Amino acid sequence: MSDNQLRVVWVYPDLLSTYGDQGNVLVVERRARQRGLDVARLDVRSDQPIPTSGDIYLIGGGEDRPQRLAAERLRRDSGLPRAVENGAIVFSVCAGYQILGHEFVNDLGQREPGLGLLDVVSVRGEGERCVGDVLGDIDSRLGLPPLTGFENHQGVTHLGPGSRPLAQVRIGKGNGSGDGTEGAYNDTVFGTYMHGPVLARNPLLADLLLKLALDVNALPPTDDRWYEALRNERISAAQQPA
Ligand code: GLN
């Protein structure tokens, strides 16, 4: 943070923002303001350079072709890896998550390089598309309540030793790699298949991003009754028999 201002960057809303992923930006912004922080939100379209001085970067999901275009532009731009070198926190969803890995399979069926910010590789799943509500247990090191989200993806993601699974699924597919994991993270970069928007369904995950960006251990409490109602509704929906 500089000038006591938290800079939140929403990467490529014109290409990557399916299933209400914009909500992730709104939740981070709102929860930061509720803690008295001055927030500057920057929406960076795909024809604009990615600033390297942001504190938190959010990237959403997308259809296969926009995903390839976004990956091409992010590779050419190189602002996001530079921001990570500067210590920025990155939170990515679905197509955005795949792009942050070493490689994914694009809409042309070709292996396409990602940014290599997360030690994961994504391939195209051979089975049915993973669609539906998900319930999982977040890695206990993060000290967060269960993960709720909605998934819709064909990709399957394999984790390398440099990334930890964000969660283990109880219901749903997540990474789809057969080990029950969902998402991945390292010290500053997070990826998940969860839409929802996931930070509205898991506000303490948004708070984790804020704490990492601010380098603090705790934040003042907020009134989370609205979030709790949403969580309860979606968790019971996930538990209904298909
Ligand atoms: N195109 C990717 C897949 O199907 C990501 C989809 C998404 O972002 N919802 O795996």
Image (spheres, rainbow, N blue to C red):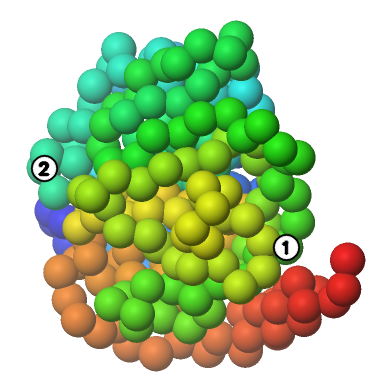
**Which residue is outermost to the right?**
242
**Residue 184 sits above or below residue 203 on the image:** above
**Residue 13 sits above or below residue 39 on the image:** above
Q: Quadrant of residue 133?
A: bottom right
Q: Which residue is drawn at 51% across and 21% down?
A: 105
Check disc 1 and report its element: helix, strand or loop.
strand
Rate crowding at label 2 as few (under 14), some (14 to 19) or many (20 or more) other CA atoms within 10 Å: few
Residue 22, position as x, y percentages in the image:
58, 48
**In the rendered structure, are the residues bearing label 1 and label 2 in contact, judged by CB atoms less than 8 Å apart?**
no
Residue 172, position as x, y percentages in the image:
67, 61
Given residues 142 and 160, the one toward you in this image is 160
Q: Quadrant of residue 102?
A: top left
Check disc 2 and report its element: helix, strand or loop.
loop
* Quarter of the rendering occupied by the C terminus: bottom right
Disc on res. 133:
1
Q: How far apart are marks 1 and 2 (CA)?
A: 35 Å
**Residue 25 sits above or below residue 202 on the image:** above
In the image, 234: left or right of 44?
A: right
Given residues 107 and 1, the one toward you in this image is 107
Read off the residue under disc 2: 86
* Quarter of the rendering occupied by the N terminus: bottom left
Q: Residue at x 29, y 83 (%)?
A: 219
Given residues 6 and 183, the one toward you in this image is 183
In the image, 229: left or right of 5?
A: right
Q: What residue type is labelled 2?
A: Asn
Residue 50, position as x, y percentages in the image:
31, 27
Q: Which amino acid does label 1 sit on?
A: Asp
Q: In which quarter of the image is residue 80?
A: top left
Q: Which residue is drawn at 51% across and 11% down?
A: 110
